[in-house]
Amino acid sequence: MREAFICDCVRTAFGRYGGALATVRADDLAAIPIRALIERNGQVDWGAVDDVLYGCANQAGEDNRNVARMAVLLAGLPVEVPAATINRLCGSSLDAVGMGARAIKAGEQQLVIAGG
């Protein structure tokens, strides 16, 4: 079985419910760390990303869509890179990382962006 490694990490600001980030769309916020990864890791073939898995809990209204896919497009990854949004409430981002790691360990994927 292959090993899975976390090779880099980026986080965004966070705040309280209804606070300073209340007007920022989830996909806009989610695109920020992907853009940072691209900028910091210029040697990576970003077209080789097998999947982007992002957790997003309690989606509603305009955010009730595939936030991960929109974040991929907003961040500038190639349109061929797939993405899925995971909603497991408080465990969404952790589940996304676990799903990516399992896919790599199973040999199904080699390069995954995961978070939430």
Image (tube, helix red, strand yellow):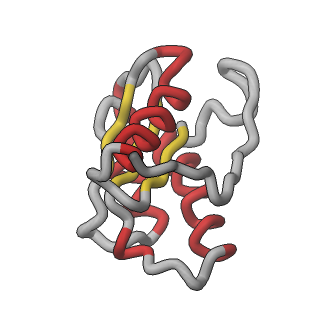
> On the image, which quarter does residue 43 sit in?
bottom right
Of 15 and 88, which appears nearest the observer? Answer: 88
Which residue is at 32% across, 55% downward? Answer: 109
Note whether 50 is above or below 18 in the view shown. Answer: below
Q: Is residue 106 left or right of residue 12?
A: left
Where's residue 90, x and y in %?
55, 15
Note whether 107 is above or below 19 in the view shown. Answer: below
Q: Quadrant of the C terminus?
A: top right
Note whether 53 is above or below 112 in the view shown. Answer: above
> On the image, which quarter does residue 103 sit in?
top left
Of 37 and 110, which appears nearest the observer? Answer: 110
Note whether 52 is above or below 21 in the view shown. Answer: below
Which residue is at 48% across, 15% downward? Answer: 89
Where's residue 35, x and y in %?
58, 66
> On the image, which quarter does residue 74 sit in?
bottom left
Where's residue 104, x and y in %?
39, 49
Of 42 and 89, which appears nearest the observer? Answer: 42
Which residue is at 50% across, 49% downward? Answer: 3
Which residue is at 63% across, 31% downward? Answer: 22
